[in-house]
Amino acid sequence: MKICVAGQGAFGQKHLDALKRIPDAEVTSLVGGNQDATAEVAKKYGIPHYTGDLSEGIKRADAVILTTPTKMHFRQGEQVMRAGKHVLVEIPVTDNVDDAEALVKIAKETGVVAMGGHVRRFNPSHHFVHKKIQKGELKIQQMDVQTYFFQRENMNAAGQPRSWTDHLLWHHSAHTIDLFQYQTGKTISDCSAVQGPIHPQLGIAMDMGIVAKVPSGSILTLSLSFNNEGPLGSFFRYICDNGTYKAYYDDLVDDKDNKIDLSKVDVSMDGIELEDREFIAAIKEKREPNSSFAQLLPSMHVLGRLEGIIDPERKAHA
């Protein structure tokens, strides 16, 4: 499977690390904005071609993984699909409902595999809980989630400057909103949110609180902040009818902080690798992938509802 990765930054490199461990994957092109940085990353990973032109990368690949700035996702996603190539778009797939609906429509028209990078569906920790829910061994009473970072400047996960601004609602809460619906198997029926002051330079809220409920009665409480100095990341507490579990990325502990062995949950302990493996497998098997654009659309609708609550002016002009 010939793959083009677009985006030479921190998350693009996470995918490059993952793809190195997948026998069926060959990265044939790296597309980036800063060509000096792109050349350096291409050399580091032994990628034979690099460019600043996405169309050049598309020509050399069967599929494209987009880890580019959010504002580019819709245009680039459409470009890839119209070229007849499969696409995986990193989270957030878009930052508005209209674009999300349009991408679902284009994916259906072109017949390509179109997938969003909602890695929480693939982290071994959350997959372990998901399997127990499917077997009827667990029912979620509440998901309590804390997503905390210290991000008062436009910096990426590697501490390097970036050209775009992250967003608590459309990026970080998207992980949890989708995961909550995925784990409960229900669509959110009731939700609300509040946000703190807007940062004068970044133009975004630095703190946010979200609550939600599905018809079965399970509830979600989510706290997000870019003002937190540590520890950093997303911390998930599953409060269930038959136990409590705490997940942190690919790790999971029980209510007594005993670490749970996840080595047999899937073929890898890395959620990004498992996400990429699903993308490649869906292409080869000509099927809808887990985390397809269509599957993610209900979450995008919830995010749109939340935006209307916390930022009605932006919603009115969307």
Image: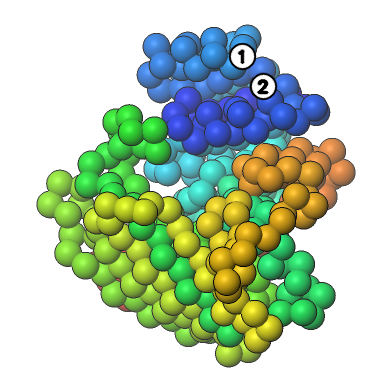
* Residue for badge 1: 47
Q: Quadrant of residue 148?
A: bottom left
- Foreground of the two, 248 or 123: 248
In percent of the image, x 57 and y 79: which residue is there? 239
* Residue 255 seen in the figure: yes
Q: In which quarter of the image is residue 36?
A: top left
Count of numbered badges drawn on the protein: 2
Image x and y of residue 85, in percent? 69, 33
Q: What element carries label 1?
A: loop
Alpha carbons under labels 1 and 2: distance apart? 6 Å
Residue 35, relative to residue 21: is it above or below? above
* Relative to 303, 126 lies left or right: right
* Residue for badge 2: 27
- Foreground of the two, 228 or 54: 228
For badge 2, the amino acid type reads Val
In percent of the image, x 65 and y 33: which residue is there? 18
